[in-house]
Amino acid sequence: ETGVTQTPRHLVMGMTNKKSLKCEQHLGHNAMYWYKQSAKKPLELMFVYSLEERVENNSVPSRFSPECPNSSHLFLHLHTLQPEDSALYLCASSQALWDSGNTIYFGEGSWLTVV
Amino acid sequence: TQLLEQSPQFLSIQEGENLTVYCNSSSVFSSLQWYRQEPGEGPVLLVTVVTGGEVKKLKRLTFQFGDARKDSSLHITAAQPGDTGLYLCAGGWEGGGADGLTFGKGTHLIIQP
């Protein structure tokens, strides 16, 4: 239990569906992240929020849409995904934007399968 | 783009054996972190090393940061089945923000009883 909770843990969706992934952190952190983990690839940073403001968008396709309504919650809205988007999506948080002294805490991830 | 190469990609050994996995880069990092990820879970931080040549121990795990801060190693003594998992290294640099943390592909370690 890292203090970062993700739901759902598993999701299967069709390419025309709209779904959302939810992340909640109970650590009082100010920074939250979405990462994508695919087989044979390093963890890829998708989005970064600091104090509810988006500070990073690493050329992520617009079919992924993040939302951070407050510092404890982070959503990833999904629509018209492709099969190659199937992956483990990890939410993470840290006290402040990552620096040498900070620790990033990961959630358990949401396994997404696009059919 | 900062790249971290981890080796070996896969390692399967018997319980009780020793092993070392490596994390190498051509870039200099201000710090390097090691994570372990068990099946079905997110990565969990094991250690952060920040000084060139630094050695940290966590029970049977020994972590070393290279003198030039470009590489790191993780040595496990008398491996146990509970050590099984994906070991990820991640390097970062001062002022990099979240973008300053680069992950390797990881080493998949299996310890057979």
Image (spheres, coloured by chain):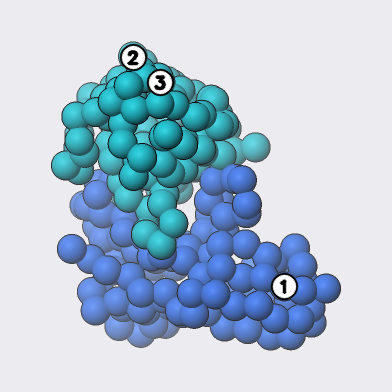
Chain colours: A cyan, B blue
Front residue of A86/A93: it is: A86
Q: Position of residue B28 (x, y in %)?
A: 25, 73
Numbered label attached to residue A20: 3
Query: What residue do we see at 27% from left, 68% from top?
Result: B3
Front residue of B16/A79: it is: A79
Identity of the residue furthest to the right in this view: B113
Front residue of B43/B105: it is: B105
B11 left or right, relative to A69: right
Query: What residue do we see at 36% from left, 78% from top?
Result: B24
Classify mark 3: residues with Cα within 10 Å, few (<14), some (14-19) or many (20+).
some
Q: Is residue A35 above or below residue A68?
A: below
Q: Position of residue B9 (x, y in %)?
A: 48, 74
Label 1 marks which chain's residue?
Answer: B
Numbered label attached to residue B40: none
Identity of the residue furthest to the top in this view: A69
Mark 2 lies on residue: A69
Residue type marked 2: Pro
Which part of the image, by quadrant, shows the N terminus of chain B? bottom left
Label 3 marks which chain's residue?
Answer: A
**Quick one: SS at disc 2?**
strand
| Cα distance between the residues tagged 2 and 3 | 14 Å
Mark 1 lies on residue: B111
Classify mark 2: residues with Cα within 10 Å, few (<14), some (14-19) or many (20+).
few
Front residue of B43/A109: it is: A109
Both labels 1 and 3 in a single chain: no
Q: Position of residue A33 (x, y in %)?
A: 35, 36
